[in-house]
Amino acid sequence: MVVKTVKVSRKGQITLPKKIREALGSGVLRLILEDRRVIIEPVEDLAGSLKKYAQPQRELSKEEVWAEVVREKFGGSSGH
């Protein structure tokens, strides 16, 4: 088990310590709030889902593409 204390910035951001980032093994994370606890899980299989968004006729920002992929994979809101 790895336990670290991090500070939340004024913008609501945190920095995940390197040891934790390496252990998660993914740059895409899912956050779950349950009984005042935040659970962070790696999302490992989105890469193949992005192929259909690479088509030139779709003019979406990277953020819009990720939000749509996450909605399709996991349902609901992307958190934005």
Image (cartoon, rainbow, N blue to C red):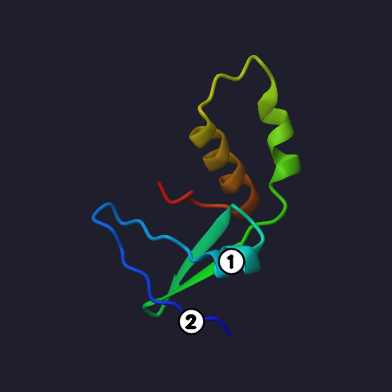
Residue at position x 58%, y 85% in the image: 1
Kindly check if marks 2 and 1 are in contact, taking CB atoms under 8 A apart as contact: no
Instruction: Specify the amino acid type for callout 2.
Output: Val
Question: What percent of the width, then of the height, locates residue 78?
Answer: 48, 49
For label 2, the SS is loop
Residue at position x 59%, y 52% in the image: 27
For label 1, the SS is strand
As displayed, is residue 36 above or below residue 43? below
Q: Is residue 8 left or right of residue 38?
A: left
Q: Is residue 20 left or right of residue 5?
A: right
Question: Which residue is at the front of the view, 15 or 38?
Answer: 15
Question: What percent of the width, then of the height, locates residue 41?
Answer: 58, 66
Q: Callout 2: few (<14), some (14-19), or many (20+) C-alpha neighbours within 10 Å?
A: few
Instruction: Specify the amino acid type for callout 1.
Output: Glu
| Residue corresponding to mark 1 | 41
| Residue 13 lies in quadrant | bottom left
| Residue corresponding to mark 2 | 3
As displayed, is residue 59 above or below residue 34? above
